[in-house]
């Protein structure tokens, strides 16, 4: 990563929104901003934790190894989101990786200063606790779905989640462009299985696909698929 001449605005990210106003000058003196090119790694699973990152501008995927040649995308991080926090704790190694999906700018805060920020800023600590709880619930739901929901149901759930996170335009097009490989990694299925089930959704006129653009035409039927498409326990 290359250090950026463009600095974050000290008001848009998870850290700055929840810090005391008196703490912001300290954040400004400690932060470092980096340019991350599309496809470039921000940090790797297993790396020693040196600090926490915040997305100032752009998009990244947070992912984990899933077998020898596969990955599972945990979530997508956009403007203002925190990444790297999963490395907090005794082991002090990142349990996931983060990779830019488009040219991005990240804000880096070294670990000692971030830990000091948690001690000083009660609201930051409280909001991070809530965020960890939400992530845990989401991970538990995803593991349940991987075990008991069919691929078609998981695709439907993924499209609903992405629509909620990134919104849709007037044509119902989801506000994030993903490769089929990344969609498969987010769903937790093989590329071939996702391709086959996507074609079935297209034939049923629930979605249309144009390159990396996916338009959702019937949210209620997709929601029905998430309830119906479970394998037997």
Image: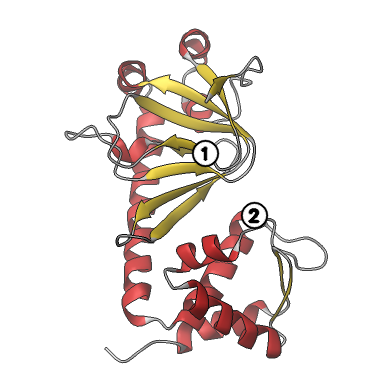
Can you give x and y, in whole percent of width and height, for residue 53 in the image?
45, 30
Vertical relation: 122 (above or below) 190: above
Q: Horizontally, is 186 left or right of 125 in the view?
A: right
Q: Residue furthest right?
A: 170
Q: Horizontally, is 221 left or right of 115 in the view?
A: right
Quarter-of-image position of residue 131: top left
Q: Quadrant where the C terminus lies?
A: bottom left
* Residue in the picture at 72% in, 61% down: 168
Can you give x and y, in whole percent of width and height, for residue 201 in the image?
63, 84
Residue nearest the viewer, comparing 60 with 26: 60
Colour logic: secondary structure
10 Å crowding of disc 1: few (<14), some (14-19), many (20+) = some
* Residue in the picture at 53% in, 63% down: 181
10 Å crowding of disc 2: few (<14), some (14-19), many (20+) = few
Task: Tell me the SS state at disc 2.
Answer: helix
Q: CA distance from mark 1 to mark 2?
A: 13 Å
Which residue is identified by label 2?
Answer: 166
Which residue is identified by label 1?
Answer: 81
* Residue in the picture at 47% in, 68% down: 187
Q: Residue furthest front?
A: 69
Q: Mark 1 or mark 2, which has the lower sequence index? A: 1
Can you give x and y, in whole percent of width and height, for residue 107 in the image?
52, 25
């Amino acid at each position: 990563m290359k250090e950026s001449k463009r600095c974050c605005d000290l008001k848009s990210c998870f850290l700055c929104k929840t810090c005391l106003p008196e703490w912001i000058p300290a954040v400004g003196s400690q932060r470092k901003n980096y340019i991350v090119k599309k496809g470039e790694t921000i940090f790797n699973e297993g790396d020693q934790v040196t600090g926490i990152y915040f997305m100032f501008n752009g998009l990244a995927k947070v992912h984990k190894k899933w077998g020898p040649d596969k990955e599972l995308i945990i979530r997508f991080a956009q403007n203002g989101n925190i990444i790297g926090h999963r490395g907090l704790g005794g082991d002090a190694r990142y349990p996931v990786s983060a990779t830019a999906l488009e040219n991005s700018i990240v804000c880096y805060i070294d670990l000692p200063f971030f830990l000091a920020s948690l001690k000083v800023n009660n609201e930051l600590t409280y909001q991070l606790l809530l965020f960890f709880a939400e992530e845990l619930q989401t991970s538990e739901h995803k593991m349940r779905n991987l075990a008991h929901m069919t691929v078609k149901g998981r695709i439907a759930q993924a499209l609903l989640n992405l629509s909620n996170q990134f919104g849709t335009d007037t044509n119902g097009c989801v506000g994030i462009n993903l490769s089929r490989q990344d969609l498969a990694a987010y769903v937790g299925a093989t590329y071939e299985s996702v391709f086959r089930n996507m074609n079935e959704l297209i034939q049923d006129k629930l979605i249309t696909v144009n390159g990396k653009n996916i338009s959702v035409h019937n949210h209620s039927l997709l929601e029905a698929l998430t309830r119906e498409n479970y394998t037997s326990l």
